[in-house]
Amino acid sequence: MPAFDKKTTATEVADAFAADIKGKTVIVTGVTAGGYGAEVARVLASHGAKVVLAGRSSKKIQETAENIRKETPKAELRELVLDLSSQKSVRSAAEEVLKYSGPVDVAILNAGIMGTPYAKTAEGLESQFGSNHVGHFLFTNLIMPKLLEAPAPRVVSVASVGHFWGPVRFDDYGFEEGKTYDKWAAYGQSKTANILFAVEVAERYKPTKLKAFSLHPGGAATGIASSMTKEDYEKFSDYYNPDGTPKGDWMGTLETSTATHLVAAFDPSIADKNGAYLVDGNVANEQAAPYALDKDQAAQLWTLSEELVGQKFAPPSAQPAAAGLN
Ligand SMILES: NC(=O)c1ccc[n+]([C@@H]2O[C@H](COP(=O)([O-])OP(=O)(O)OC[C@H]3O[C@@H](n4cnc5c(N)ncnc54)[C@H](OP(=O)(O)O)[C@@H]3O)[C@@H](O)[C@H]2O)c1
């Protein structure tokens, strides 16, 4: 198996797993040009995957599709309009996926917002928690039948080292309706939730072939930093100059910062590390905050998330046996 590190590119990972990628259906959320999702989609399409470009703006999805087709004219692309900040939109996108003719092999839950001013989702949830976690929780659970049709399905939850900025605040995930809002603790909470979600999916779907992983992709200049202010650059002065340019060499490129997405999605050698957190292309549970991999908190978050979407999702072992088999 090739060794991956901070400098590995997504294309190098895809070359290593080319046979596994070809012909697979992969949903990637958050595919705006210039971001990680668009890069992952580009590399997957160039390696023969059928890529579902999921995003909240049809115009942005089409721009990414056009960019991909310049490089891979025969790319197999499909558009899926999905606004993670609206459960109604998530449900209608999932209904569309359930009508696809074949299985969904991998869902790469990549979309996200970071450090945004206090706002609420359509259902009144704090927006970073509501979009980054709750929207993906609902979407993944609703499309689960399609994932379970695949021979070796995976759920890839794109988190961040930013999960260190905060655990899930079970007693006050909404920051007292915004009164005590801290945009970085809120991002941290949402990214911790992304890691806990993979832990709980792995646990619940143990009886199946489904595997789930979370990851920190590495840093790169994308649209995600658009909400950052001068005060934020001062707060993170170890990493940024006052004008917002990065200090030192911690920042990677779009190509290197998407390599771990593809390792989590396709590397067969990590299959026995179900639920793990990856960094720089390798399993790196020791680099996660203990609260982010805590099994009790993962189960607690699942229950809370079910309440927030108003629907329970039973693990496969708890589902009634198919008619005729009992
Ligand atoms: N860049 C970094 O240094 C870094 C570091 C650690 C982790 N990450 C993680 O990497 C992931 C990708 O971020 P990125 O850096 O590529 O940023 P990006 O270019 O801003 O991409 C984020 C994507 O998420 C989409 N999105 C936001 N809200 C959405 C919603 N309500 N419904 C559907 N899609 C929505 C955005 O669409 P719009 O264009 O419509 O807003 C965009 O396509 C995020 O989960 C982020 O937390 C990034």
Image (spheres, helix red, strand yellow):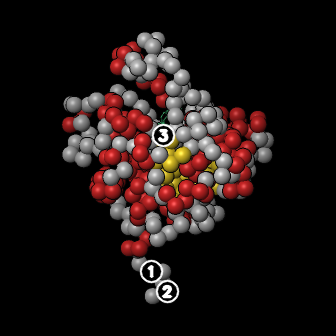
Looking at the image, which is closer to me, 260 or 302? Answer: 260
Task: In the displayed orientation, state which residue is furthest to the right.
Answer: 73
Q: Do the residues labelled 1 and 3 touch (CB within 8 Å)?
A: no
Q: Do the residues labelled 1 and 2 touch (CB within 8 Å)?
A: yes
Residue 279 pos. (x, y %): 50, 41
Say which amino acid is labelled 3.
His
Looking at the image, which is closer to me, 2 or 97? Answer: 2
Circle 3: is it few (<14), some (14-19), or many (20+) Cα within 10 Å? many
Residue 304 pos. (x, y %): 29, 54
Disc 1 versus disc 2: distance between alpha carbons? Answer: 7 Å
SS under mark 1: loop
Q: Mark 1 points at which residue?
A: 321
SS under mark 2: loop
Vertical order, 215 against 148 (above or below): above
Disc 1 versus disc 3: distance between alpha carbons? Answer: 38 Å
Q: Mark 3 points at which residue?
A: 216
Q: Name the residue under label 2.
A: 325
